[in-house]
Image: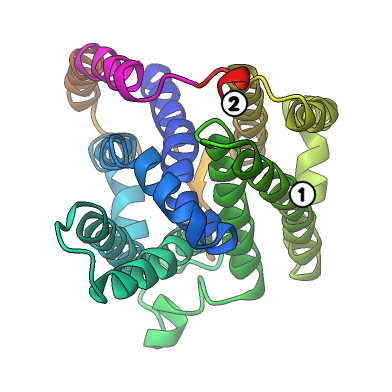
Amino acid sequence: MLSIIIIILGISFILYTLLGGADFGAGIVETFAGSKGAKTISKAIAPVWEANHVWLILAIVILFTAFPEVYSTISTALHIPLMVVLIGIVLRGSSFTFRHYDVTNDITHKYYTAFFKISSFITPFFLGITLGAMIYGDINVDVPASFFEGFIKPWLNIFCISMGLFSTSLFGYIAAVFMIGEANYPVEQKRYIRISKNFLALTIAMGVLVFVVAELQGHHLVTEFFKSGFSIASLTLVLLITPLIYYLFNHPVIPFLRGTVAIQVGLIMLGWFAIQFPVLVFEKNGKHLTFYNTQAPYATLYQLVIALFIGLLLIIPSFYFLFKVFKQPKENNDI
């Protein structure tokens, strides 16, 4: 039963990275696509942007129900970056809504666009910082010596910042690839292909930076990585897929390209989970929070599994119908 919950939690994070990543990354891509890309991007994400948050909500519900100690630790020690994430989500959603659905196109749209772009950078950056703090191991669950020691130092460091840069570039990469299939003209499609290539290279560079910074900070991720056969296999597949993706950039078959990139991103996350598993939060005192020492009582897990199955029976068909209606991929010869 616990294994089922862990699998659903992992799938929720992967789906939020893919779907929410394309959502938040759209604002990042718009910064580089220019004003000509704003209309296409707004039209592309308008039908689905709000629905993507379902997977984040599902992951949060699983955490505070099945692993309450993990939830309380994260929400207390990392309340500052989490608050910035929430502000970014609200600011981005509201600014996009006002910009896209406002009946009057006036000077206020410039401010909506500015807030949309800024919050699209802020949110994935601080999501990465939060994840980095959970990995870095500087969270102190005991009474901290000072406010800085307890609530700022665990996340305000070079490693967490590198994780923020990695997540931001990854979200931009996912969104740029998604936008290739949303382009209306060949020139526009080529623009998103160029942006996708740049973000892929940037994401690889930021991934390497994370491991380099971790070693410099005394957190030996490289050693932990080579201890996991699954992580090695995942990275190997990611590297093998990359040339195929470059080929698909130059000969785009939209469904195949999107699916290949989704597999690539999923493998990156699975490889990371394998390094981390079963730890959820690395603590400063060495008493790490795992799936097994923080799980809720059996009765709670039992009821949660029932609720998850009923919920997924409703969510999955609804999502399929939503994307079937609004997100039919364009054929390459129609662009």
Find numbered disc 2 in the image and state the secondary structure of the residue it sits on: helix
Looking at this view, is 25 or 269 the one in front? Answer: 25
- Residue 62 horizontal side relative to residue 276, left or right: left
Looking at this view, is 269 or 292 the one in front? Answer: 269
Find numbered disc 1 in the image and state the secondary structure of the residue it sits on: helix
- Residue 111 horizontal side relative to residue 221, left or right: left
Q: Is residue 222 visible?
A: yes
Magenta residues span 313-329
Q: Is residue 4 above or below residue 291?
A: above
Q: Is residue 122 above or below residue 28?
A: below
Q: Is residue 172 above or below residue 305?
A: below
Q: Residue at x 63, y 24 (%)?
A: 263
**Crowd class of label 2 (few under 14; some 14 to 19; many from 20; radius 10 Å):** many
Q: Amino acid at mark 2?
A: Arg
Q: Which residue is mark 2?
A: 258
Q: Which residue is mark 1?
A: 204
Q: Is residue 134 visible?
A: no
| 1 or 2: tag closer to the N-terminus | 1
* Residue 195, percent from left and from top: 67, 50
